[in-house]
Image (cartoon, rainbow, N blue to C red):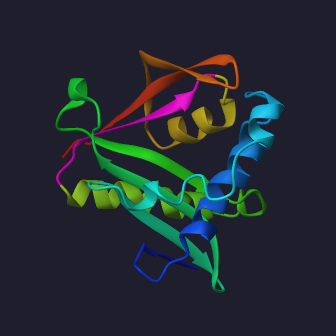
Amino acid sequence: MEIRYINSLDDRMAISGIYEECWKYAYKDIMPEEYLNLIEEGKWSSVLDLPGWQTLVCVEDGKYVGTSSFCESRFSDYKNYGEIISIYLLPQYIGKGYGKKLFSRVMDELYKQGYDKIFLWVLEENIIAKKFYKKYGFLETDNFIEENFGGKQLRAVMFVHYRYK
């Protein structure tokens, strides 16, 4: 298994496919089924190269099995924070240690960039993800944002990690 930064030779459609499959798996009981079924192929391919975003891929035997994007905070209220935008692993690779390795690498990269405060957003109903982040020292806050997905209003709560030197 290899974890590395995305490069110009990487297949953006295949990486977007990880997002698509993961959303349908992780959010199947959270978001409306019709909304998930209508996710277009390649929906996330264009965001992988947004200015300021950095993306890692997890590759096993030539197959993309996970991805994570991160950056300096996109929110003015959280200046000087690193932000984990996304972290996804194909469902068949969950529970095998890949997620832990990918997540650790993302944290290391943000630390190397000088961030001692790192945050991410988690859908309030995504209990599995919340447990994962808490296991790695993230604290759930009272901060939240709301978004509408297929007619259903959902709340994402902020989780924060403070690095103590």
In the figure, is residue 82 to the left or right of 104?
Answer: left
In the figure, is residue 150 to the left or right of 68?
Answer: right
Identified at 46% across, 83% down, the residue is 9
- Residue 38: x %, y % from top left: 76, 42
Identified at 72% across, 42% down, the residue is 26
Q: Is residue 108 above or below residue 73?
A: below
The front one of 162 and 67 is 67
In the figure, is residue 161 to the left or right of 43?
Answer: left
Identified at 58% across, 32% down, the residue is 130
Q: Is residue 110 above or below residue 126?
A: below
Q: Is residue 151 above or below residue 1?
A: above
The front one of 116 and 124 is 124
In the figure, is residue 100 to the left or right of 23?
Answer: left
Main SS of residues in magenta: strand
- Residue 74: x %, y % from top left: 29, 37
Where residue 52 sits, quadrant-wise, is bottom left
Q: Which residues are magenta?
A: 114-124
Q: Quadrant of the N terminus?
A: bottom right
- Residue 61: x %, y % from top left: 66, 86
- Residue 127: x %, y % from top left: 67, 29
The front one of 162 and 62 is 62
Q: Is residue 64 above or below residue 28?
A: below
Identified at 60% across, 60% down, the residue is 16
Report if residue 117 lies within the magenta region. Answer: yes
Report if residue 37 lies within the magenta region. Answer: no
Where residue 108 sits, quadrant-wise, is bottom left
